[in-house]
Image: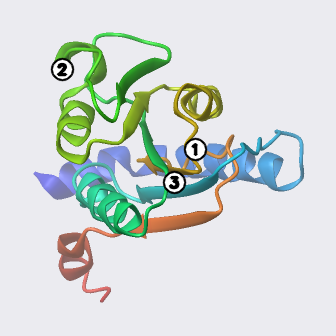
Amino acid sequence: MLNFIRIILSPLTFIYAFIIRTRNFLFDKGFFKISKVNAFVISVGNLTVGGSGKTPAVIFLAELLKKHNKQIGILSRGYGRNSFGYLYVSNGEKIFTTVDECGDEMYLVSDELKVPTAVSERRVVGAKRLISNSGVKFILLDDAFQHRWIHRDLDIVMIDQRFLIKTNSM
């Protein structure tokens, strides 16, 4: 069954690849503007869809940066939330929203880490507002590797090890 689905969907991969390459070319040549914000931005993302450990990596990095007394904030798209736009989730002491409004992962991160957090589909807007709301100097972007509108000072790409083993690409 998996091979049948792969055969049916394979022509779409060429179309998707063309669109992504064109988009990346436009960013690389400056046709699309990459915006810089007043914080050191670390993006944690992946190349595949789904669980490759992005959020646990963000939590680990946040804990590490907190140990070194860095003023950090976390910005996510807010996967699974029933709201849209920018939402200031927590100032690090108090959570201002509900699980439904910000998404379960961001609520968990906010509750566990006690750092300023926000959600926004538009990462540049979200980062600027998070800086304005909380004065953070470091922003961790959860699931933002393919989001090119915001300048990232560091990209961390997570790879699902099961994919590497399945394809014998290790």
- The residue beneath circle 3 is 145
The furthest residue to the left: 1
Q: Percent from the top left, x then y, of residue 73?
A: 45, 43
Q: On screen, 75 above or below 49?
A: above
Neighbour tally class for label 1: few under 14, some 14-19, many 20 plus, Cα within 10 Å:
some
Q: Which residue lies at the image location 24% right of the left edge and 25% below the top edge?
A: 103
Task: Examine the image and state in which quarter residue 89 appears.
Answer: top left
Colouring used for the render: rainbow
Say which amino acid is labelled 3.
Phe
**Dot 1: element:** loop
Neighbour tally class for label 3: few under 14, some 14-19, many 20 plus, Cα within 10 Å:
some
Q: Which residue lies at the image location 59% right of the left edge and 66% below the top edge?
A: 154
Tell me: 20 left or right of 55.
right
Q: Percent from the top left, x then y, of residue 61?
A: 36, 64
Query: Which mark identifies residue 99?
Result: 2
Neighbour tally class for label 2: few under 14, some 14-19, many 20 plus, Cα within 10 Å:
some
- The residue beneath circle 1 is 147
